[in-house]
Image (spheres, rainbow, N blue to C red):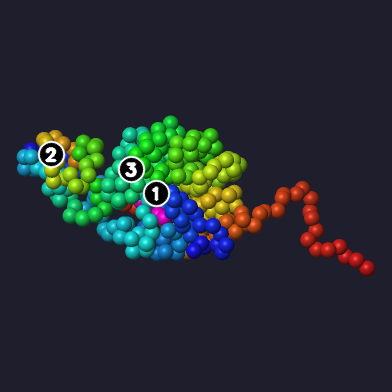
Amino acid sequence: MEIVINGTAREVADDMSLDRAVELISSAATGIAAAVNGEVVRRGSWPSTRLASGDQVDVLTAVQGG
Amino acid sequence: MTEVQGDDPLVLGGQKFGSRLIMGTGGAPSLDVLGRALTASGTEVTTVAMRRIDPASPGSVLDLLAERGIKVLPNTAGCFTAAEAVRTARLAAEALATTWVKLEVIADEVTLLPDPVELLDAAERLVAEGFTVLPYTNDDPVLARRLEQAGCAAVMPLGAPIGSGLGIRNPHNIELMVHAASVPVILDAGVGTASDAAFAMELGCSAVLLATSVTRARDPELMAAAMRSAVIAGRLAFRAGRIPRRFYAVASSPPVTG
């Protein structure tokens, strides 16, 4: 299926879990957060969150700013 | 330990800080330069923005702050609506394990001025969710009062638009806020050089938040040291009490006699 991670469309395995999708972007143990279709998903819930075709996944961290 | 002998610490969101200079991290030419500037500034709280991870990005601003024992204050820079700001604050809380947020809800890209309606809405929602909300606001004493009533832990009026370096355009309004507020008033944005930071403190602000004036200075580390001294000087002057302005001279030497 196709999902969009940080604005880029990617072909991934069907029913991929959110923790696997995040791993495609970062392996950081702390300092990152993820949202699916704009809703923040707690880190503890990443493995049990199944993604669906067309989902928009955002993986964020702190950068210089302000 | 405060930077001014005999001074009270800055109390923000129930925490005490010796330094009254809050730094931002935007605009620095490199992490190395930023790190040296932060050390020179003596800051204990520093803002960061939340963005999509860029795998090509070198180093981490979080490591830089952690190494120096500086508290991370995530902001909602780039948000135009209350909904966006609330979501960004939640992401920051999840990523950084903090419930503090510098709330920015801007109206447009040209002025970067706060949108007061969206700002107050976002502040009310985030306070209800248990956040310690530090709102970047206009130099409007009435809006500041509404933000305080909404439960914000401070009010942070701009001296002038972000990055403009125009100084404090309406010092009377800043003084009105200081007189009315029971939470810290923190001058946020507009500082161009050290005298602007000192002036903010002389007006009675509890702290100054700045970034561009340091990070885009020719020598950021040196300007950070200047800002540190300026905030201390302004605080000392505020505590000492300035003399009244007079139309005519008042001789400082005794009259010549005999």
Front in this rendered view, residue A29 or B30: A29
User: Viewer-nearest of labels 3 and 1?
Assistant: 3
Mark 2, chain letter?
A
Q: Residue at x 18, y 50 (%)?
A: A25
* Closer-to-camera residue (B178/B31): B178
Q: Inspect the image, locate mark 2, and give the three-letter code of the amino acid beneath it.
A: Leu
Q: Secondary structure at mark 2?
A: loop
Considering only order in the chain, which callout, 1 or 2, is on the residue closer to the N terminus?
2
Please state the chain letter of the residue tagged with numbered disc 1 in the rendered image: A
Q: Position of residue B148 (x, y in %)?
A: 48, 39
Give how far across and how far down residue B19 sits, in percent.
Answer: 48, 59
Q: Verify CB contact (< 8 Å) between mark 2 and mark 1.
A: no
For disc 1, the neighbor class at 10 Å (few under 14, some 14 to 19, many from 20) is many
Q: Which residues are magenta?
A: B45-49
Kindly identify which residue carries mark 1: A66
Q: Are marks 2 and 1 on the same chain?
A: yes
- Disc 3 and disc 1 on one polypeptide chain: no
Q: Percent position (x, y) of residue B124?
A: 40, 35
Q: Please, what is the three-letter code of the amino acid marked with disc 1?
A: Gly
Q: Is residue B34 left or right of residue B233?
A: left
What's the residue type where badge 3 is placed? Ala
Q: Which mark is residue B89?
A: 3
How far apart marks 3 and 1 lie (CA) works out to: 14 Å
Give the residue displayed 53% in from the left and 51% down from the top. Answer: B206
Residue A64 on image: x %, y %: 34, 52
Instruction: Name the outermost residue toward the left.
Output: A14
- Quadrant of the image occupied by residue A56: top left
